Amino acid sequence: MLIGWSSIDITPSRPVVLRGQFHARISQRINDPLTATVLALEGTDARGGSHQVVMVSCDRVNAPSVVVARLAEAVAPRIPDFDVNLLFVNATHTHTAPEIEEGHYPEQDPNVMTPTEYQDFFVERVANAIVQAWQGRTEGSVSWGYGHAVVGHNRRISYAGGLARMYGPTNQPDFESVEGYEDHGVDLLFTWDTRSDLTGMIVNLACPSQVTESEYYVSADFWHEARVEIRRRHGEQVFIMPQCSAAGDQSPHLLLHKAAEHNMLRRRGLTERQEIGRRIANAVDDVLPLAREEICSGLPLAHSVRVIALPVRMVTRAEYEAASREYERWEQERPAPDDVTATSCRFVMMKRYERVMKRYLEQEQNPVYDTEVHVVRLGDVAFATNPFELFLDFGLRIKARSQALQTFIVQLTGTGKNAISCYLPTAKAVAAKSYGAEVADNVVGPEAGQLLVDRTVEMINALWPEAT
């Protein structure tokens, strides 16, 4: 097996519009660097066929398909022995990284870096990193393991009467429960050189990186602290690739046990982000000695890519009319021209409801949403991608039925142009409503989620012919 790593700084040099809220935020400073990390693999499957994969992880809110296409176009002539269709890019979902597509927010002051300028900068730097990782491939080995770290929590709170609310209060009489499960598992894959020295690791967990999501600075959020702590323990030379598993209804925000948690942070003298970094590093430390005992070379590598036609979530007449009313309400708002927050919020919300109305008018002609899914087998583990903020339950359904020993779900690997959000909610969440489960938040709905599960499981298990 040939393994290549690289990483690159993707921190903007000028103020930018930060993506992650319904209003525009202009960055005032750099809190910590943004990073893109690349892992290139080449090997053979169980039948001797040659396979390749290049994975890219980046500190961003999303990984738009148009940007992934530009990356493929940029690297194709530079590494002709790599099939660029076998490239996928995932985002950690930090809410303090630059907007990368025009049209989501209104135009800003000329001193602010435009999304197009940042996209050009991002594509150039990440393309260089992809080429470096591919050209730097050397013989190596891998190992894997499974650990635990309490990072993500279900963020939807259920109340008497059947409705839910994102980040709803839990200290009121009608609070009933947290809507869904939370998964504290950490899937880990380690790479080693021919001397059995650690070269890098994939850390996959079910939580977006959004502790400090509303700030006015550039930041990788808790993955910065996690990288710092892991490297402090295991060496600055170690590459660290974060992957966000299915976590559309998950968040690091505390909705229960707040006082007790904050008291423990005070006692430890840590920030919330530092505490999460400590927990992730502890999970690595717990698994790494055992993974070191079972380093494997000559493992099967296989990579399958498929475009799945998912049925769109149909907009009802009532939803169309509600969106029309909301559009008209926002259209009548008249914020002061110099009020960036208010003017940008009006702009975003009008586009949000305009999209719903347009979908209603065109849905009979556009009944499916083409969704690219990558499935990779590496030894006993599988990687399965999707472009959504996929609710946790769907990821668990894939894992439960997968023939792989461990299945790394990788969400946010490509989104449609200017999508405000692309959640894929469960039927329970749609019935309970609230943000993330509303029609404006979903291109596809629960039925498509189950179809995505079924087709992904088929793709994974097809790479395990010895299990059938």
Image: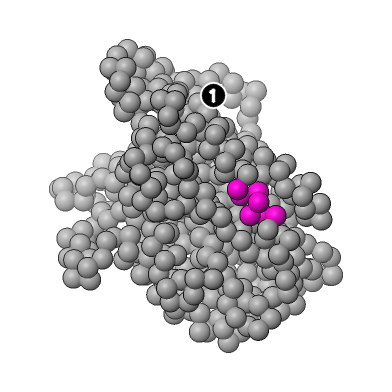
Query: Nearest the camera: 82 or 392?
Result: 82
Residue 228 x/y as whole percent = 42, 66
Considering only vertical position in the picture, is 297 above or below 179?
below
| Model colouring | one colour
Q: What's the amino acid at mark 1?
A: Arg
Does residue 379 belong to the magenta stretch?
no
Considering only vertical position in the picture, is 271 above or below 138?
above
Q: Residue furthest bottom?
A: 293
Q: Is residue 416 left or right of residue 186?
A: right
Q: Is residue 167 visible?
A: yes
Q: Is residue 264 visible?
A: no
Q: Residue at x 29, y 14 (%)?
A: 334
Residue bearing the label numbered 1: 359
Q: Residue at x 37, y 70 (%)?
A: 279
* Label 1 residue SS: helix
Quarter of the view holding residue 338: top left
Label 1 CA crowd tier, 10 Å (few <14, some 14–19, many 20+): many
Q: Is residue 389 left or right of residue 454?
A: left
Q: Residue at x 54, y 76 (%)?
A: 145
Residue 234 x/y as whole percent = 48, 76
Q: Is residue 91 left or right of residue 65?
A: left
- Quadrant containing the C terminus in the rendered view: bottom right
Residue 379 x/y as whole percent = 68, 73
Considering only vertical position in the picture, is 192 above or below 31?
below
Query: Nearest the camera: 202 or 428?
Result: 202
- Quadrant containing the N terminus in the rendered view: bottom right
Q: Main secondary structure of the magenta part?
A: helix
Magenta residues, as a range? 125-131
Residue 360 x/y as whole percent = 53, 22
Q: How many marks?
A: 1
Q: Residue at x 82, y 64 (%)?
A: 50
